[in-house]
Image (cartoon, rainbow, N blue to C red):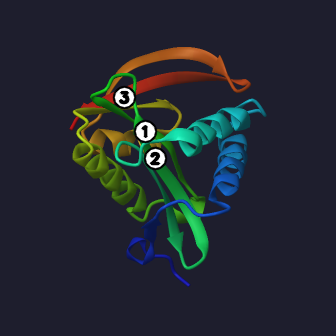
Amino acid sequence: MELSASDVVLDQLRIGDAGWLIMRHAEGYAGDDGFDDTFEPLVARILADFLSGHDPARARGWIARVGGRRLGSIFCVEGPAPDTAKLRLFYLEPEARGLGLGRRMLEECLGFARAAGYRRMTLWTHQSHRAACALYVKAGFSCVRSRPVRSFGVDLDEQEWTRDL
C-alpha cells in the first residue's frame, strides 16, 4: 500500500502510545544521529510530565496514524512564559517523511497554540535535523540561538527556534 498524507489521521493519545513514542524516539535518534542511552530518559520525562498534569485547554499531543499503524507524534505544551507554547516530541517514521505529513502536523500544532491563546511558539532542535529546520523556516520560525554542545554522547549544534502566532 502506498502511503499518502491524506490517509493519515491525527489522533489523541491512546493506551500504548506513550511506550511506542519513547521507544521510537530513542531508536530513531540512536540510529539516525548516534544518540546514546541518555536520550531515552529525557523523552520519558517529557512525556511523563505531559501525561501526569497537562491542562487539555493549554497542551495537547497527537499521534499520526494510518489504520492501526503509528507514524509520528507532535506535542504542544506550555512554554517558558504564560504566552509562549513549546513544540515537543515531533517525530515521523522514515516511511512517512517527504509526504507533507510533517507540515500538516506542524500546522495542527500551531493552530491549537493560537486557539489556546498563546502568542508565540518556541522549539529546541539540532542543526543536523536539516529537513525539520527547513520545515520550521517555511512555517515562519526563526533560529534565535545556536551553540555547540556535547549531548547524548555526540557533538551537536543545539538550536532554539521561535515564531509569533
Q: Residue furthest bottom?
A: 1
Q: Earlier in the sequence, mark 3 or mark 2?
A: 2
Mark 3 → mark 2, Cα distance in angstroms: 15 Å
Q: Residue tagged by mark 2?
A: 75
Q: Quadrant of the C terminus?
A: top left
- In x, y percent, where is residue 128? 53, 34
Residue beneath label 3, please? 161
The image position of residue 139, as x and y in percent, is 27, 44
Q: CA distance from mark 2 to mark 1?
A: 6 Å
Residue drawn at 68 percent across, 61 percent down: 16
Image point 30% across, 50% down: which residue? Answer: 112
Residue type, mark 3 in image:
Trp
Mark earlier in primary sequence (3, 1): 1
Q: Neighbour class for label 1 at 10 Å: few (<14), some, many (≥20)?
A: many
Q: Describe residue 121's horizontal placement relative to residue 119 as left or right.
A: right
Amino acid type at image mark 1? Val
Residue at mark 1: 77
Q: CA distance from mark 3 to mark 1?
A: 15 Å
The quarter holding residue 13 reads bottom right
What residue is rendered at 58% in x and 41% in y?
52
**Of 36 and 38, the residue lying toward us:** 38
Question: Badges 2 and 1: C-beta atoms under 8 Å apart?
Answer: yes
Which label was assigned to residue 160?
none
Camera-nearest label, 3 or 2: 2
Examine the rendered structure and indicate whether residue 83 appears above or below residue 2.
above
Q: Secondary structure at mark 3?
A: strand
- Secondary structure found at label 2: strand
Look at the image and tell me in which quarter the N terminus lies. bottom right
